[in-house]
Image: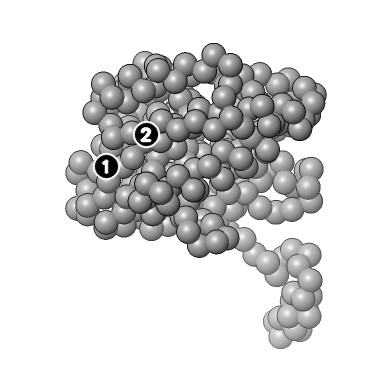
Amino acid sequence: MEPSVEKLERRLLDRVARAIGDFALVEDGDRIMVAVSGGKDSYTLLHLLERLRRRAPIRFSLLAVNLDQGQPGFPADRLRDWLAGNGYEHRMLRADTYSVVTRKLGPDETRCWLCSRMRRGVLYDAAVELGCNKIALGHHRDDLVETLLLNLFFSGQIKAMPARLVSEDGRNTLIRPLVYCAEREIAAFAGAMAFPILPCDLCGSQPNLQRRRVKKLLDDLEAEHPRVRDSLLAALGNVRPTQLLVRGEGRRGRAHAIAD
């Protein structure tokens, strides 16, 4: 039996609160820009942060920000009406990154990396202009473990996404309060809440993305081992450099082995 929307909300709220506590994501006096794309993850993030804001022992504020990237037919009005109708302070921005991405990359090339990089740059500048000291993004548990595997398989790196990241220029702090939340529960919650989901016709429509292949691999593994994604997430916080091929660690590792 599917859990009720109330149970889903409680479960997601508990996990967001735990992430906030574990990584100091929200602090007294914060003004947080919540990047709302119109997808299930960002709607859920905004909803949960607002619920926590109302009952938190500290004071912080939220500003929902959407960036219209110039995709033809993007229904920005639907999102604007929903934000206004639900009483969220919000700003609607526009920057035509769509034409830049489509001009630089062919239809068979993966566009997500360039699209997200350009979007991030616009949001960084907007956060400073709007007086926001943090930017909340809707990446969840599945995004983290898929990114880990993508980097392992295709770029030879052990890295994923941190829950909290200070930008290189020090102007912005990114936070990811959904890092403990499973995508399937977010999808179920967003469906139960009837959030007005907006389509992404730039990268979401591309076939044969490597991320889709990794997602299918994880789904297949979880059919036999249901906690595979949780295990991978735990591994991100349980790193043992002396057991890896890290240059400079060999001498120390050998010394420890001799001492033992």
Tag of residue 91: 2
Q: Quadrant of residue 232?
A: top right
Check disc 2 and give the amino acid type.
Arg
Q: Residue 25: horizontal and vertical position, in percent? A: 39, 54
Residue at 70% from the left image edge and 42% from the top image edge: 149
Quarter of the picture holding the N terminus:
top left
Q: Residues within 10 Å of mark 1 (few under 14, many from 20)?
A: some
Q: Secondary structure at mark 1?
A: helix
**Above or below for 27 versus 148:** below
Q: Residue 179: horizontal and vertical position, in percent? A: 48, 44
Q: Is residue 13 visible?
A: no
Residue at 50% from the left image edge and 62% from the top image edge: 170
Tag of residue 32: none
Question: Nearer the viewer's eye, disc 1 or disc 2?
Answer: 2
Q: Is residue 123 visible?
A: yes
Identify the residue position indicated by label 1 in the image.
52
Q: Residue 228: horizontal and vertical position, in percent? A: 60, 39
